[in-house]
Image: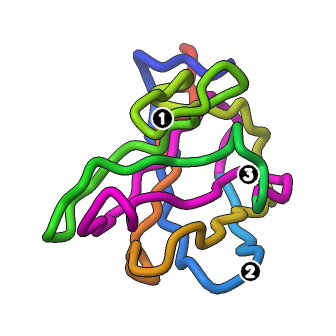
Amino acid sequence: MPDEDAGTSCDVDVAVAPGPTPFSLPCAGLYRLRGLVRAPSDGTNSFFVDIDQESTGAQAKIWDLDVTATFEEQDVSWRGEGCAAETCAELDPKTWSLTEGGHTLYLGEREPGTEIPADAVHPHGGRRSAPRG
């Protein structure tokens, strides 16, 4: 696991596209996703999301957003296996343990009208260890 108190950040930006979106990480670590989103109502405030595994249709992998009329950054959360209600996030924020190199983001529309700009998903949290000397 990278040393999170030292070294260089391994944050990256991912340009979201319809369907699976490949991206690459410069170092291994524990990551979370943050996205710039707009969710105008309770009926238009969720996506399916996962990394390296298809998420569409998986109840546990639903990212329920806080309702917002304007775009704002929100951390990805998951309902998880123990939550069926929209107001429940069992994994908040959701984290992924990821290796250095190539991965695939799966972000699927769940409710029409929920918006995320094409360049607004950011895996962050990993660190490249500082040189030991």
Report which residue position mark 1 lands on. 125
Q: Is residue 27 left or right of residue 71?
A: right
> Where is residue 43 shown, x and y percent of the image?
39, 63
Give the camera-side residue of 13 and 91: 91
Extent of the magenta region: 26-55
Magenta segment includes 33: yes
Question: What is the three-letter code of the residue carrying label 3?
Answer: Ile
Q: Which numbered circle lies on residue 19?
A: 2
Q: Can see residue 18?
A: yes
Task: Report the residue marked by disc 3.
Answer: 51
Residue 95, horizontal then vertical, whole percent: 59, 31
Contact, mark 1 vs mark 3 (Cβ under 8 Å): no
The part of the image, by quadrant, that contains residue 37 is: bottom left
| Comes first in the chain, label 2 or label 1 | 2
Number of numbered discs on residues:
3
Residue occupying the point 46% across, 40% down? 86
Q: Please, what is the three-letter code of the amino acid marked with disc 2?
A: Gly
Question: How dense is the environment of label 2, judged by Cα within 10 Å: few (below 14), some, or many (20 and up)?
Answer: few
Q: CA distance from mark 2 to mark 1?
A: 24 Å
Quadrant of the rendered image containing residue 18: bottom right
The secondary element bearing badge 2 is classed as loop
* Picture coordinates of residue 98, whole percent (x, y): 74, 38
Left-right relation of 124 to 97 = left
Which is closer to the viewer, label 2 or label 1?
Answer: 2
Q: Position of residue 7 (x, y in %)?
A: 46, 29
